Each structure stands twice: as structure tokens, then as C-alpha cells.
Image (spheres, coloured by chain):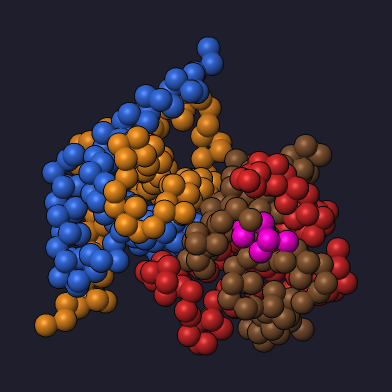
Chain colours: A blue, B orange, C red, D brown
């Protein structure tokens, strides 16, 4: 994994340990929290048209950026708990997707 | 953003363009797809106890890793569409979280 | 469908029409809103143990009841838009489930 | 609650008891399962335009009806576990919503 993601992962470990949150951070609970944050992200878009979602105001974009960060932070923590390298997993999945959805020529 | 995430982002742009998926990839739709993938991830854990979720078999861990990758791939694409740097957004959110949840001393 | 559900459905139609919300209430958007409300419901449970979730305080139970109502109201609206009878659909699905998961004897 | 919903609720209790699923059906787990089913419902709509979502084929409508049923069945079970009357909760929430979103005149 890249240096930036490792550094974020270590910071998240410290953050949880300092607050005694580790007992709450089972993979089951982290997966639920991730799903809840993904829905909070979706909530920003639910009544917008697709066209409007492509033209967010700067304020809205900042709010959405915060929700995206929440999803990412839980994803990093869940991957860390399970010993999964996010970048490796993403690359492997892209290889599978390329086979599943071949380019039409 | 780190080199690895930039490289994944560029690969995802190519992947979508080659398949003519760009018209479908509005931020609204990507946010919905992200939320759906997060739920597929959660599905693996829904009937497990928290203890069981901490002790996944190698097979189950591989399946969960694929779902984690799906969430990550949509997150990268949504962040790209909105011009949001995932790592910067995550760092900023951790600063906010540190203020919101101060360490008890 | 039962009288109570029909009466709720009609009240929801009036509610949306009086507020000029109909253009926003495409099945796609209602499905997103339903998913968001289901996540708000899950949020109440995400850090609880299963045992704690079986022993909610009266206050918490009331909060959870409001989220359950939100899910139900969107479900009724989505079913109405698609001309689906909730009770009939539920009964048909229980028949399928009985075949899929036979009782072990 | 109406006779139909009571009858479904009792059938769901029997269904779970006969399969020895009760230990799995904590409110926490049922809320997760409900959220997962809501996402499966959303999945049918994620790449459709809003206009397309208003014009489902008969086949697609049947598939969506099955997902709607799954959401409803978990909602009934969760409400039952928590002693919440779905119809009463929905009516109370509509009163709150009417105050929160007054009709513009």
C-alpha cells in the first residue's frame, strides 16, 4: 500500500486506541458504519437530477467531500482489521472486471 | 494524492470510457452504486456475531476483500468526478474528528 | 391491501401533491430515499451489541420507531408508484422463502 | 395494526422459530438485513434514468416487487421485535412531517 494510506491507517489506529473504541470496532460494526456513511453520502444526491449532481456548488461539494472522507476512513479501518491491502484489492478487482465486461470492438 | 491512487483513478477513467459508461456515471448514480456495494459488503457480516467477524476464514476474507475493492473503486470514481482528493479529504476529516471527539484524560 | 395501508397510501399521495413533490418522487429517487432511511435506522444499532439491541430504553425505542416509520412511508410510496400491493407481495415472497429454506426435520 | 399485518407478523414468527433463526434475529441484525435488502432494491434503479424508473417492464416490476417484499418482511420482523405498531408509527410520523413541511399557500 502507498505511504499515504499506511500513514492514514496508523493514524486511525492511534485515534481509535486513544478513545478506547477498539472493542466497538469489530469488522461487523465497521461494515455497518461504512454502509451508514455511504447512505449519508447518497442522501446529498437523492432529490437532485443527474445533471444537477454533475454541477454541485462549491459549498455542496465541500459537504459531499466530508461524507466521502467518512466512507474512506471506515474503509481504511475495515481493510486494516482484515489485513487487506486496499490498492492491491482494487487492482485485482479491476482485472476481474475487465474479464467480466470485455470492451466491445 | 498518492501515485497509486492517481494511477487507479486514471485506469478507472479509461475503463469507463472504453465501455461508453460515462453517461451513466453521474455523481448521483455513482453514490447509489457505492451505497449498494457497501451493503453487499455488510451482507457478509449480517448474521455473524462480532466475534465471528473478527475471525473470518481465508475464503471469506477473500470474498470480503472483493467487496471492499468494489466500494473503493466507486469511491475513487466519485471523488474523481467531483475533483476531490481522497487523501486530503481524509486528513481534513480526521482533524475535525479529533476536535469533535477529544481524548478523555 | 388492507384498509389501513390504502388509507396511508392515499394520505401520502395527498401529502406529496400538496407540496409539489411529485416530480421528485420517481421510483429511482424513492428507492434511494428508502435506502437512506434504512441506514438511519441501522445507525441506531451500529455500536450496540446484539444483546443491547434487544434491550432498548423507552426513549431509544421511540427514536427507532420514528426511523421505522420513515422506512415504511417510503416503502408505501414506492409500492404505490409501481402498482405493487405490499401485503400480496409479502405473502408471495413468504411462499418462495418457504421453498428456498425448507424446515429441517 | 391491521389484521393482514398481524397475520403476516405471526407467520414470520413461526417461520423464524421453525428454522431456529431466532438467535440471529436481534434487532441489530434485522436492521442490517433490512438495510441490505433496501440496497438490493436500489440496485435495480442505479443505472436507470428517473424517466426509465417510471416505465418499468412487467418483468422488471415483478423483480422489484420481490425486493420490496423482502424489505417489508424485515421491517415487519423488526417492528415486531421492538413492539412497534407499523401503522400507528407511520401515522404519527405523518403528523410530524406535516408540521415540519407545512403546505405553502
Is D51 or A30 nearer to us in this picture? A30
Disc count in the image? 0
Is A47 or A21 nearer to us in this picture? A21
Residue A45 image position (x, y, % from top left): 53, 57
For residue D19, side relative to residue A86 (left or right): right
Q: In this picture, is B21 found above or below C80?
A: above
The quarter of the picture where the N terminus of chain A appears is top left
Residue shown at the point (48%, 74%) measured from the top left: C54
Residue shown at the point (59%, 72%) measured from the top left: D81
Residue D69 seen in the current view: yes
Residue A65 seen in the current view: no
Q: In this picture, is C5 found above or below D104?
A: above
Residue D101 image position (x, y, % from top left): 66, 80
For residue A76, side relative to residue B68 (left or right): left
Residue shown at the point (50%, 87%) measured from the top left: C59
The segment highlighted magenta reads D11-17
Residue B84 image position (x, y, % from top left): 34, 51
Is C67 or A7 nearer to us in this picture? C67
For residue C38, side relative to residue C10 (left or right): left
For residue C60, side relative to residue D12 (left or right): left
- Residue A2 in the magenta stretch? The answer is no
Residue C94 image position (x, y, % from top left): 72, 51
Residue shown at the point (42%, 75%) measured from the top left: C52
Q: Residue furthest top?
A: A105
- Residue D15 in the magenta stretch? The answer is yes
Q: In this picture, is B24 found above or below D105?
A: above
- Magenta span main SS: helix
Amino acid at each position: 500500500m502507498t505511504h499515504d494510506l499506511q500513514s492514514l491507517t496508523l493514524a486511525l489506529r492511534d485515534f481509535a486506541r486513544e478513545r478506547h473504541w477498539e472493542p466497538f470496532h469489530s469488522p461487523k460494526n465497521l461494515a455497518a458504519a461504512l454502509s451508514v456513511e455511504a447512505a449519508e453520502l447518497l442522501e446529498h444526491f437523492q432529490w437532485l437530477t443527474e445533471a444537477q449532481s454533475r454541477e454541485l456548488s462549491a459549498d455542496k461539494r465541500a459537504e459531499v467531500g466530508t461524507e466521502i472522507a467518512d466512507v474512506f476512513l471506515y474503509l481504511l479501518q475495515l481493510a486494516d482489521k482484515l489485513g487487506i491491502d486496499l490498492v492491491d484489492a482494487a487492482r485485482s478487482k479491476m482485472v476481474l472486471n475487465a474479464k467480466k465486461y470485455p470492451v466491445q470492438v
